[in-house]
Amino acid sequence: MAMSVEAELRVATLNVRGLAARRRQYQLSRLMLERDLDVIAIQETKVEGQDQTDRMVSPFRARYDVCVSHAVGMSAGCALFLKNSIGIVEETVTVSSTGRFIVCDFTYNNKKWRVVCVYAPNKEVERKLLFENLQTFLSCGRIVIMLGDFNCVCTPQDRAKKAAIKDQSAALLCTIVQDCHLEDVGDVLSAEEHFTHFQNESHARLDRAYVSVELMRVCSNYEVKSVSFSDHSLVMFTIGYKKKKTRFNWDVWKLNDLLLKDELFVEAVQDSINKMLAEPQANVIEAWERFKEVTKMKAIERSGVLHRAKKKRKRFAMSVRLCVESRK
């Protein structure tokens, strides 16, 4: 039975090839802002410890709740970002001890959802074992979205070399998708070849999204876009419908003047300036552009924090006023 979603979710997946560096974090944050993404599955963070994780998620916390599966050494690592301003109510989170998957249950639009972020291993045997483990999470009575880097293809058309598929893990994945009543979003919505990973001549559609069959009817706007900082492409699609919003445009973005009176923001900008001046710069123009990008993201993050604090103060003042009036 087809279902309706009376709101819109813009969903995406991307293998970032490392998210420990501050520059990569701001590149991703800017991409998420520009594309107006609501649910984003990220693979290969290569971030292991809690301190590193806190540093990794700090540029995103103003706008997203973040679920993390830690890397093991410099291998694997996943993160799932849920926009905190659209009414998603997080319920439970299950993460892999090997940094290979995240399962997040939440309520949205009066419906029960389960999102599974997957980063499959390169080795076939390990990949097959991962898919076997994931199968237990996919038959759950919830709306399911499973997306990520599966490191295998299910049809010859999904890679440049059109040879027959002999990968047992891919065969198992196809069986699981069928048994759990899931659909490949890219396969249904796009008639064109959209490879998502490019390595020499080995092009393939490794990054995919699967959704519950009943959800497929309200999925649209499937896109594959290359990014400057990874050899994987950003894969995006939309669930549900709503009035089209104007996409964020850096050209018309203006700094909130109130931030110039905010001590924390001013200190953060001064710190960025000191770091830029302290480092030897081979290309001054590139360093300046990087500084501007970082400052913009800090301004957006701080503005979000201040806005939520203002709303909280208003709610508190309203509660106090109602309490006083009720005692009169």
Image (cartoon, grey):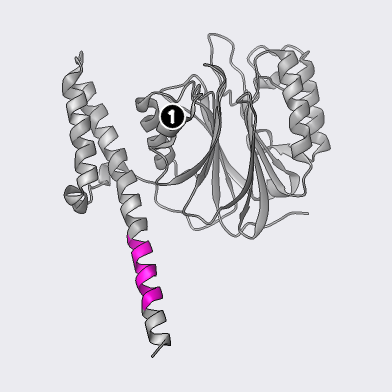
Q: Nearer the viewer, residue 320 or 223?
A: 320
Vertical arrangement, residue 144 with respect to residue 131, above or below = below
Q: Which residues are magenta?
A: 310-320
Check if residue 313 falls in the magenta segment: yes
Residue 13 in sight here: yes
Q: Horizontal and vertical percent for residue 36?
A: 45, 45
Vertical arrangement, residue 313 with respect to residue 80, above or below = below
Question: What residue sits 68% from the left and 33% below the top?
Answer: 187
Q: Secondary structure at mark 1?
A: helix
- Predominant secondary structure in magenta? helix
Characterize the local packing of mark 1: few (<14), some (14-19) or many (20 or more) Cα atoms within 10 angstroms. Answer: few
Q: Locate the C terminus by quadrant.
A: bottom left
Q: Horizontal and vertical percent for residue 75?
A: 56, 17
Position of 315 compared to 221: left or right? Answer: left
Vertical arrangement, residue 28 with respect to residue 156, above or below = below
Question: What residue sits 41% from the left and 87% below the top?
Answer: 327
Q: Horizontal and vertical percent for residue 81?
A: 51, 40
Q: Horizontal and vertical percent for residue 289?
A: 23, 28
- The residue at the far top in this view is 200
Vertical arrangement, residue 213 with respect to residue 5, above or below = above
Residue 118 in sight here: no
Q: Nearer the viewer, residue 325 or 276?
A: 325
The residue tagged 1 is: 51
Question: What residue sits 20% from the left and 39% below the top?
Answer: 267
